[in-house]
Image (cartoon, helix red, strand yellow):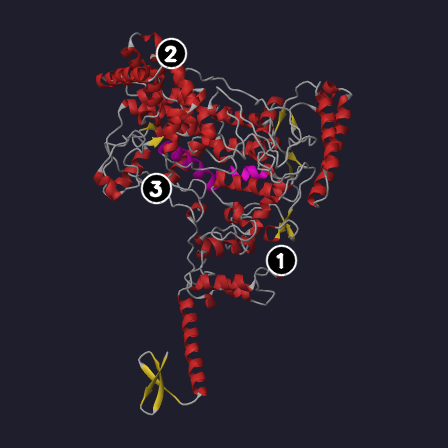
Amino acid sequence: MKALSQGDNQTMRHGDHYIPIKTTKTIAHHLHILLSQCLIGFLTSLTAHAEPVNFSREVLPILSEHCFHCHGPDEKARKAKLRLDTEAGATAREEPVIVRGKSSESELILRITSTDAEEMMPPPEEKSRLTAKQIEILKRWVDEGAPWGGHWAFEPVKKPAVPAAGQGWALNDIDRFIAAGHEKAGIKPVADADRRALLRRATFDLTGLPPTAEEVEAFVADKSADAFAKIVNRLLDSKTYGERWGRHWLDVARYADTAGDNPDYPIPQAWRYRNWVIDALNADVPYDEFLRQQIAGDLLPAKTEAERHQMTIATGFIALSRRFGGGTKEKIGNQTIEDTLDTLGRATMGLTLSCARCHDHKFDPIPTRDYYALYGFFESTQYPSTRTGMDTVVKLIQPEVLKKIVGESGEAVAAAAAKVAKLGTQYDQLVAKNLPAMEKEKELDAAQKELADLKKDWPEIPEAYAVVDADAGKDAMLQVRGEQKQNGGSVPRGFLRVLGGQKLAADAKGSGRAELAGWVASKENPLTTRVIVNRLWHHHFGRGLVTTTSDFGSRGGLPSNPELLDWLADRLVTEKWSLKQMHRLIMLSRTYQLAAAESPESFNRDPNNALVWRFDRRRLAAEEARDAMMIVSGVLDPTQPMAHPFPRMGKLTEHAPFRGDFPSDHRSVYVMQQRNRRHPFFELFDGANTSSSTGERGHSITPLQALFQLNSQWVAGWSEAVTTRVKEAGDTAARVKQLYRAVLGRDPNGEEVAQGVGYVAHFTAAAENAGETAALASLTRVLFASNEFMFVE
């Protein structure tokens, strides 16, 4: 506004109008009017642009909590023949309870707002009235047309009809779904991969190792129609399959050999869970059973004692939850259980459950009460500890047998362990209050030494870092804003309302993890099957049909081919949850066998290759690169190792934490992994983050990686080992040929042989006191760093 003068009258300009001004009161009056108009306009614009009600996040939780127990999927419990958990059920009645666009005429709204005890819903005896905010949400939803737009991932898995597309091109039904996408987008797929590229691709995919030159030549020479099928079967039957795909699962299970607390205590028994995963995948344990054992193996029926031990070991999936803090006394608090729930949700169902710990999930239909309904299963579970004096790891031996083995020393050890635990608690209390603790630490160290001396003559007793049920199951208290001391009332143990919302039976015994495992691994759980087949697709093609492999919520990606995703999820159950059968199905498709070639026209239509018109080239994963160099060098130990050589630990603190580096000639999956200090090789080449569930790894290409390949002492040693293997080949040209066969799995052409011979001659002439062996080792490092070695097409 600007005051102006027009003759004798002062005016105030507002837009294109002039307002006469006579007094200060008049000015104030007009300002008031103008500000009021601005405020009204602002509020009107807010109302006009308010986002529509989100059915999954806002409506579904209300219906689930207040309506589904009487008007839900359970036909026996259903009342008034009204079903509200499906759109069809809510609108199927002759007189529908929802009149779309008219909340004032909808019986649903009339019932939830009624004060008549005969009409109100929920009934007064349930003492579960909706809040004013919840009623307003439902009113707005009905007025907006009551869209039943549930998020796709929570919808039941459908078995879509297989398209008729891809005639003459498709090798199986997967190809027909892919071809339908091609035809719709006007895309033509590239040609098939050549046999050498296909064998290398399949061998790395299933085993994490390169094929030998002899294997390549045999496959190229095999002209039979089932030549590739025989390759896939051979690779799936190899024990190296479990080592490769076990690593994928250990990524999402956030496997590590240390606890992750400030001192990063070692977990000497963690290897048993690691090896269990590898062996279970090699045995093709059905995926639903694979999950059930990891969640509740200690509670499931077993035929033999040995089987019970293996199923108990499987619960390392839960036991390996990250620990927090830095004291001596083991404390399983809300952060550790949060890590359990976060990993369980991401790994098995693609859900970010921990987002609901402090408040209702902002994007997905997961209320805080649902979070604590799941929390209770694990608050009723005893987690293990490896800290000195906290003897809570599981003994894989009968108690009476253990007592017979240790004899009278057992009571002395138990007493010494109790003493350590007591002193540890006192030490923690002093540190927490910032009081002097030096004297008490001395006492603690002496007690720990006494305990170690008592146990030093004990025979080795097999132990598992596993969980067991606490004495009795109990429901958790809701922690207001995620604070353990802010009690928000008891929450009955149960499952997510968006996926059924069943409660744990009142007469259920123990933690309820067995029931939880059954719910997660049910064929009726649409997330579980979709997530695992998407993970398979991701690891075979470099990207999932849903690119966010551990987030199927509303903030995650949408499926690039939703019909194919559901078809694969349905097929998994049809194939009795066999992952190996799914590998065969995917790899024997023409889609998998496409070349990693370019097509400018297809690229312009689909630059991200979401419709899979070619195979995406990829760099070797960290473990693949290390293992490939080692097996080519002949230094890889193919056996399955057990425990790491952890030294006897004294008292560890956040200022003096555990640090370990155990050289190993075994495959990378067996290398000791710390939580708080990543292995330098795996860190450089984008290995998994061992502190949290990792669904997709990063894919960086940096100068440091190339420099490492050329200068690392590890790579130098492996290169020298390759040179030793080829030194008997003959002259320099013959040795160069053998290097190519060993490292790249093929014979070099004439130009490459000449370049190699020239390189060796130049190296020996330029480097003082360097013979041909050193030159060949240098050439090997060059081949190791080449794109042909480091990438799969």
**Type of amino acid at the residue the image marks with label 2:** Arg
Instruction: Give the secondary structure at mark 3.
Output: loop
- Crowding at dot 2, Cα within 10 Å, few <14 / some 14-19 / many 20+, comes out as some
Residue 641 drawn at (x, y percent): 53, 20
Q: Is residue 320 visible?
A: yes
Q: CA distance from mark 1 to mark 2?
A: 79 Å
Residue drawn at x 31%, y 41% as measured from the top left: 608
Residue 560 drawn at (x, y percent): 34, 43
**Type of amino acid at the residue the image marks with label 1:** Glu
Instruction: Give the secondary structure at mark 2.
Output: helix
Residue 363 drawn at (x, y percent): 47, 52
479 on left or right of 82: right
Q: Nearer the viewer, mark 3 or mark 2?
A: 2
Q: Nearer the viewer, mark 3 or mark 1?
A: 3
The residue that mark 1 highlights is 126
Residue drawn at x 44%, y 54% as measured from the top left: 87
**Type of amino acid at the residue the image marks with label 3:** Asn
Q: Which residues, given as a range, are shown in magenta?
A: 515-541
- Where the N terminus falls, by quadrant? bottom left
Q: CA distance from mark 3 to mark 1?
A: 44 Å
Residue 561's disc is 3
Residue 32's disc is none
Instruction: Give the secondary structure at mark 1.
Output: helix
Overall secondary structure of the magenta stretch?
helix
The residue that mark 2 highlights is 725
- Where the C terminus falls, by quadrant? top left
Q: Nearer the viewer, residue 584 or 213?
A: 213
